[in-house]
Amino acid sequence: MNSEYVNFKKHETVEIKKSFLTSQLKLLDTFKHFKEYKRLRTDELLLKISLKEKVSRLKENVKNLDKMLPKAEHSSLNESFNEMSKRMTLEEEIDSIKKKLATLNEY
């Protein structure tokens, strides 16, 4: 195996060393950012797990509260709302309100 040598001028050597050191610095910064990213993702995961547990407990509390509270009858209110929604579609309601506004603007 033969070794070959390349002779660089002084300013070329300095530029090559600068370039190499800059590359090393960027690589180390990338590793540092990646490490911080991993830490943040771990924190995010722990927070999501905690949130999920809290939401589950809240749902369970709401269910228990719903069981404890007396049941109220709202059937007449629900029936009147259902009848109203069957009678008019959303577009018909919008048209009706626009007509009412037009008549009020005439005064």
Image (spheres, rainbow, N blue to C red):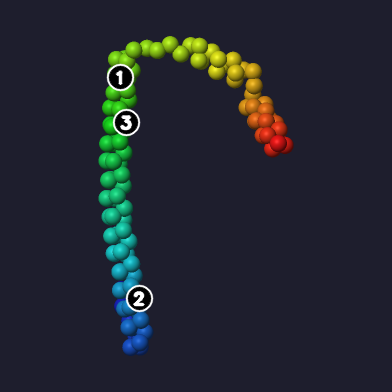
Where the N terminus falls, by quadrant?
Answer: bottom left
Where the C terminus falls, by quadrant?
Answer: top right
Report, in whole angstroms, how far the alpha carbon at label 1 lies from the one at label 2: 68 Å
Q: Residue at x 31, y 38 (%)?
A: 48
Q: As shown in the figure, which amino acid type bears the numbered disc 1?
A: Leu
User: What residue would you read off at disc 3?
Assistant: 55
**Labels 1 & 2 near each other (Cβ < 8 A):** no
Report, in whole angstroms, how far the alpha carbon at label 1 lies from the one at label 3: 15 Å
Residue sticking out furthest to the right: 106
Q: Earlier in the sequence, mark 1 or mark 2?
A: 2
Q: Nearer the viewer, mark 2 or mark 3?
A: 3
Q: Residue at x 32, y 25 (%)?
A: 59
Q: Residue at x 31, y 58 (%)?
A: 33
User: What residue would you read off at disc 1?
Assistant: 65
Q: Earlier in the sequence, mark 1 or mark 3?
A: 3
Q: Nearer the viewer, mark 1 or mark 3?
A: 1
Relative placement, left or right, of 39 versus 93 is left
User: What residue would you read off at disc 2?
Assistant: 19
Q: Nearer the viewer, mark 1 or mark 2?
A: 1
Q: Secondary structure at mark 2?
A: helix
Image coords of residue 57 (percent x, y): 28, 27
Image coords of residue 74 (percent x, y): 46, 13
* Front-most of residues 5 and 43: 43
Q: Secondary structure at mark 3?
A: helix
Relative placement, left or right, of 61 versus 101 is left
Q: Rate crowding at label 2 as few (under 14), some (14 to 19) or many (20 or more) other CA atoms within 10 Å.
A: few
Report, in whole angstroms, how far the alpha carbon at label 2 lies from the one at label 3: 53 Å
Snapshot quadrant of residue 66: top left
